[in-house]
Amino acid sequence: MSNTRDKRLAALGRVIDTLDILRVRCPWDAKQTNESLRPNTIEEVYELAQALANDDTADIKKELGDVLLHVLFYSKIADEQGRFDIADVADALNDKLIFRHPHIFGDVKVGNAHDVETNWEKIKLKEKGGNRTVLAGVPEALPALIKAFRIQEKAANVGFDWEKRDDVWQKVCEETGEVSEAIASGSQSDIEVEFGDLLFSIINAARLYGVNPENALERTNRKFISRFNHIERSAAESGRAVSDLSLDEMETLWCEAKKQD
């Protein structure tokens, strides 16, 4: 165990040393700031998410390295400004992990993972400098689907949830009816509002049934792309574009693709 730990620390130390050199000698690295790196960081996180979705071991390792580089880079910039360094980041993280896991490092008893999540939210509310409200910890910049899921998770962790998960379908049906009413009214603003409510209720239903809606939707996206690509390839093989196909022809090819899933 000690040898493995030493190997990991040595590897991280080499990366830190290399970044220190690049920050001095490389014109591009030397000019980077938090603001200039921020868009690249967002891109790297999405690339990691893609690698994870593909379950590509080599790509996951590569993208984790890219994300780690950004963590080290921001810490390096802060160190240069006399604010903090990577050791402070690691120490703060370790302290937080210990504080938020009293069932491991303290005397709190939990029965399952849900108990851990519920306790986690209560601890975060008590933390010095932590979130003052239950939903304050949900980043405003999150994509709307993920944001809705996180909002619902946090509310549920403090008891704001359906007593029986099957009850959520009544809400989904109610919101579906309100979408129909809005469409009948012809008000584009009302239609948008009601579609938002319907999507929110469906995301809530997914959560209650243990499904991450982001992952579920991405699986459907990939399935649609695969099936549509089959239609496009088939059209090309017959010397035509997709737009030249009739709806019946598209449907036939779509059904062919479904059988290949």
Image (cartoon, rainbow, N blue to C red):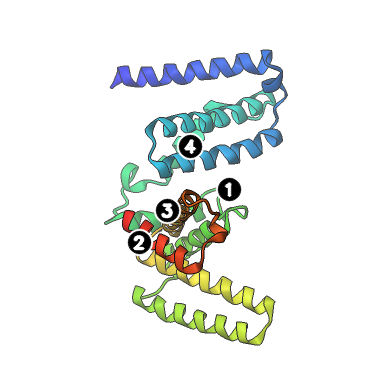
Secondary structure under badge 2?
loop
Residue ranking furthest to the front: 239
- Expressed as whole percent of the image width and height from the top left, the position of residue 167 reads 38, 78
Quadrant of the rendered image containing residue 7: top left
Find disc 4 in the rendering and name its residue: 93
Find disc 3 in the rendering and name its residue: 120
Mark 1 vs mark 4, foreground winner is 4
Gap in Å between the C-alphas at discs 4 and 3? 15 Å
Q: Is residue 70 visible?
A: yes
Number of residues whose C-alpha sits closer than 10 Å to that of mark 2, classed few (under 14), some (14–19) or many (20 or more): few
Which badge, 4 or 2, is on the more N-terminal residue? 4
In this rendering, is residue 166 above or below 177? above
Which badge, 4 or 3, is on the more N-terminal residue? 4
Residue 114 relative to residue 17: left or right: left
Mark 4 vs mark 2, foreground winner is 2
Give the amino acid at mark 3. Answer: Trp
Secondary structure under badge 3?
helix
Number of residues whose C-alpha sits closer than 10 Å to that of mark 1, classed few (under 14), some (14–19) or many (20 or more): few
Find disc 2 in the rendering and name its residue: 210
- Expressed as whole percent of the image width and height from the top left, the position of residue 14 reads 49, 15
Mark 1 vs mark 3, foreground winner is 3
Gap in Å between the C-alphas at discs 2 and 3? 19 Å
Gap in Å between the C-alphas at discs 2 and 1? 32 Å
